Image (tube, rainbow, N blue to C red):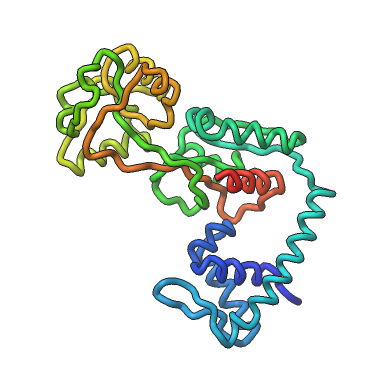
């Protein structure tokens, strides 16, 4: 009997040119991808790929021969699945989405509204938590999809497949520090001013600490804040200079309530990643949401 899953893995590896990228796209582990390729090669009695330094390359005697037929067959089956999904599986059930309150507000709000209009039969459950807690929810089947602040410690229980947004951490100030407008500052200079930083044990704070320490600087905050919104309020009111993603303060920057300091060197860009449980059975409602996110990138 033909195992279609093996051919799907073969096709994805061929298209991606990489075991790692194929694993991310298929939401399975890299060893599982390697095992599937070995199993198919054993069944067919021929090598399908050449393992090259730059990635996976189709072998002339095997992979290149079967690839066109496999591609046609999978596209045909994909069309059948799409039609059945439209007829029988118009998205229903519950979709549990986990993210921080800020990610919901500034990154996902428009996409969630659009998804709700496209799939009104799906009940959307929003779970607002910090990234480490979202990871635990994904692993314990309390969440279907999570959006995590990166970088974060690898976890074998989840797969981070996509980057959905980039975050540019900057130093912002209000009119109380207007003398700093347009002035070039170093990270060392910031030690002379009251700083507002997010509380410890957060991805954002760890990123700032690591950046400063790499330059031989220890940034000690005058105030540690528990939320970005509260930090913006305090910075606007002149309590100090805050470090937060530019993307989280668009209105205040646009209206002139806050301005961005010219600090050199700039902090590294961070990202928000899409994560799902490893080897999870993905319902149509979840696949439709991920597909919509990818189309809008």
Instruction: Looking at the picture, tell me which residue is in the foreground, 159 or 165.
Output: 165
Residue 215's image quarter?
Answer: top left
- Point 68% across, 46% down: residue: 288
Instruction: Looking at the picture, tell me which residue is in the foreground, 292 or 283.
Output: 292
- Point 57% across, 31% down: residue: 109
176 left or right, relative to 230: left
Residue placed furthest toward the front: 182
135 left or right, relative to 42: left
Q: Is residue 37 above or below residue 198?
A: below
248 left or right, relative to 209: right
- Horizontal and vertical percent for residue 52? 43, 77
- Horizontal and vertical percent for residue 5? 67, 67
Instruction: Looking at the picture, tell me which residue is in the foreground, 172 or 52.
Output: 172
Q: Is residue 136 above or below residue 105?
A: below
- Horizontal and vertical percent for residue 34? 53, 71
Which quarter shows the N terminus? bottom right
Q: Is residue 17 above or below residue 265?
A: below
- Point 55% across, 34% down: residue: 108
């Amino acid at each position: 009997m033909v195992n279609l899953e093996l051919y799907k893995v073969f096709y994805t590896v061929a298209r991606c040119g990489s075991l790692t990228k194929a694993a991310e796209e298929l939401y399975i582990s890299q060893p599982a991808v390697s095992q599937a390729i070995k199993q198919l090669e054993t069944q067919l009695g021929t090598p399908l790929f050449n393992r090259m330094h730059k990635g996976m390359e189709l072998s002339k005697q095997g992979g290149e021969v079967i690839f066109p037929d496999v591609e046609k067959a999978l596209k045909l089956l994909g069309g059948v699945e799409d039609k059945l999904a439209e007829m029988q599986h118009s998205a229903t059930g519950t979709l549990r989405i986990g993210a921080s309150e800020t990610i919901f507000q500034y990154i996902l709000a428009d996409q969630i509204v659009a998804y709700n209009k496209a799939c009104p039969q799906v009940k959307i459950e929003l779970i607002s938590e910090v990234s480490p807690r979202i990871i635990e929810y994904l692993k314990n089947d309390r969440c279907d999809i999570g959006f995590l602040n990166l970088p974060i410690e690898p976890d074998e229980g989840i797969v981070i497949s996509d980057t959905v947004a980039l975050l540019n951490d900057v130093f912002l100030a209000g009119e109380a520090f207007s003398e700093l407008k347009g002035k070039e500052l170093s990270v060392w200079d910031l030690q002379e001013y009251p700083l507002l930083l997010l509380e410890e044990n957060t991805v954002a704070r760890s990123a700032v600490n690591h950046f400063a320490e790499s330059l031989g600087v220890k940034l000690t905050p005058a105030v540690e804040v528990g939320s970005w919104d509260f930090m913006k309020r305090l910075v606007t009111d002149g309590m100090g200079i805050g470090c937060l993603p530019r993307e989280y303060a668009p209105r205040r920057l646009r209206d002139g309530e806050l301005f961005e300091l010219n600090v050199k060197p700039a902090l590294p860009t961070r990202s928000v990643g899409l994560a799902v449980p490893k080897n999870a059975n993905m319902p149509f409602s979840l696949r439709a949401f991920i597909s919509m996110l990818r189309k809008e990138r």
